[in-house]
Image (cartoon, rainbow, N blue to C red):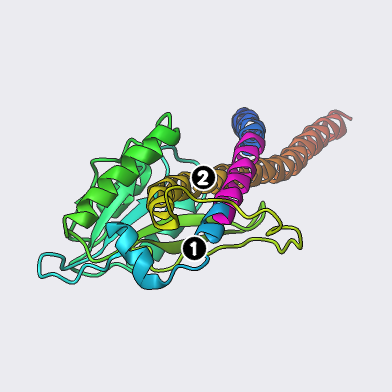
Amino acid sequence: MGSSLARIKRRIASIDSTRKITNAMKLVSSVKLLRKRKAMDSTIDYVSSLQEVMSSCMEGMDMSEMKLASPLMLEKTGEKAKGDLYVIITSDLGLCGGYNINIVKFLKTLIKEDDTAMVLGSKGLSKLKDEDISSIDSDNVSILNKFNFSSALNLREKISTLYIQGEYKHVYLVYTKFKNALTFIPSCETILPLEKIDINVSKNDNKNIYPPEFLPNKKDVFALLIPKYLDLLIYERIIESGVCEEGSRRNAMESATDNADELRSNLNIEYNKARQAEITSQITEIVSGRVVEE
C-alpha cells in the first residue's frame, strides 16, 4: 500500500510541474496575442486607407486600362506556365494545437500535381514533407523569423518576378483567417493576377467634395499602387496568421492546464482513498492484535 501512495504522490508532483509550465506558456501567449492583435488591427486600418485611394484611382478606368497598367494584372496562358504557386503560411514554433495541421489539410484540398507549394514556417515544412506533394519550395521557410514589412516586400518581389517570367499561371496565398479568439479559418486568396481588388470603403456623403488629383495620370498612379498594395496584403495576411497561431497556442495551453487540474483532482481523490484504506488496515491490525492478547 505504501508503494502505491508513493507512486501517486510522484504523479501529482509531476503534474504540478507540468501545470506550471503550461500555465506560464498560456500567460505568455496571452500577452503576445494582445500585441499581435493590435498590430493586425492597425494594419487593417492602413489597408482600408490604401483601398480608398485605389478606389478613387479606379473610378473612370475600365479593366483593359487596368491590365495595361501593370503586368501583374495579366493572365499567363503560355506553355511555360503549367501549374500554380501556393504560398502557405504556417509557423516556426509548435505547441499551437491544430494550427499547422489544419492549414496543411486545407492545402491538400487545393493543390494539384503540377502545382508548387512555397512554405513559410519550418513546422509546416516538416508536415508537408510527410504528404504526397511533388514540388515544395523551401527557400523562404525562415522568413517568419524576425518578420517585418521588408520581409513581405522581398517575398512579393520574388513572387512577382516568378509570375512575370511565366513560371506560374496563378499565385495563391493560403493563410489562416481570424474570426474570433476561438475560431480560426484556413483560407485561400488569389494574389496574381490581380483580376479583382476588393474595395471595402464605407459610404461618406462628403467623400467627393474635394476629389484627389492624380499626377501625371490615374493609370501611372494605379501602376505605382499595385506593388504597394500587394506588399501590404501579404504583410497583413502573415500578421493575421500570426494572431491565429498565438491564439491557437494560448487555447492549447489553457486546455492543457485545465486537463492538469482535472487530472490532479482525480489523483487527489485516488490518493485520499488509498490513504484511508491504509489507515483502516492499520486500525484493523491493531484491534485484531489487542483481541488476540485478551
How far apart marks 2 and 1 lie (CA) works out to: 41 Å
Q: What amino acid type should be assigned to the residue bearing mark 1?
A: Met
Badge 1: how crowded within 10 Å, few (<14), some, or many (20+)?
A: some
- Picture mark count: 2
Residue at point 77%, 38% (across, down): 272
Between residue 56 and residue 273, name the one nearer to us.
Answer: 56
Q: Which residue is mark 1?
A: 58
Q: Earlier in the sequence, mark 2 or mark 1?
A: 1
Q: Is residue 42 magenta?
A: yes
Q: What amino acid type should be assigned to the residue bearing mark 2?
A: Cys
Q: For the stretch drawn in magenta, what is the main secondary structure? A: helix
* Left or right: where 290 falls relative to 38: right
Q: Which residue is mark 2?
A: 96
| Mark 1 element type | helix
Q: Work out which quarter of the rendered image holds the C terminus and state it.
A: top right
| Mark 2 element type | loop
Badge 2: how crowded within 10 Å, few (<14), some, or many (20+)?
A: many
